Image (cartoon, helix red, strand yellow):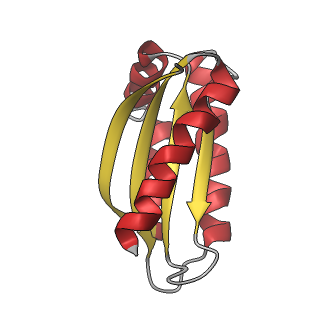
Amino acid sequence: MKRFLLAIVFCITPGLALAATGDTATVEMFQCELKDGKTMEEVQANNTRWLAHTRKVTGSEDVNSYALTSVVGDLTRFVFADIYPTAAAWAAAKSAEQSDEGQAIEDGFEALMECTENRLYKSTQH
């Protein structure tokens, strides 16, 4: 079942990215699980901070973030798909994580969730 859900996520996410940014995009995906006592609402609130900060440092409103959550099954597991219009925008976002504001946001994520896998993809429309 886990592989089936991941296959669906990986098939759908490039479409989300392309719809947001044109015919190519850089997509970073994280497979995560909530820590005990934490909620998706808390994660989403921190992610809203992350998105605002990332858009500011990359200078692009075309950066987007999606939380793919289960409808049935283990509701503590989820996937983040962060969509960047270019690899340069992704690199700028990663560099910004080293700032005081960026580190505070990353610390917030670490307090809320554990991410066991991540991958960076180039998404191209055919």
Residue 107 showing in the rendered view? no
Mark count: 0
- Vertical order, 69 against 80 (above or below): below
**Quarter location, residue 99:** top left
Residue 47 horizontal side relative to residue 101, left or right = right
Q: In the image shown, does 65 or 43 lie closer to the viewer? A: 65
**Quarter location, residue 29:** top left
Q: Which residue is drawn at 42% across and 56% down?
A: 7
Q: Residue at x 40, y 52 (%)?
A: 30
Q: Residue at x 58, y 58 (%)?
A: 68
Residue 21, percent across and down? 64, 21
Residue 120 showing in the rendered view? yes
- Vertical order, 99 against 12 (above or below): above
Q: Residue at x 60, y 35 (%)?
A: 15
Residue 79, percent across and down? 48, 58
Residue 38, percent across and down? 54, 78
Q: Residue furthest front?
A: 126
Q: In the image shown, does 13 or 28 lie closer to the viewer? A: 13
Q: In the image shown, does 17 or 112 lie closer to the viewer? A: 17
Residue 31, percent across and down? 39, 59
Query: Could you tell me which quadrant the N terminus lies in?
Result: bottom left
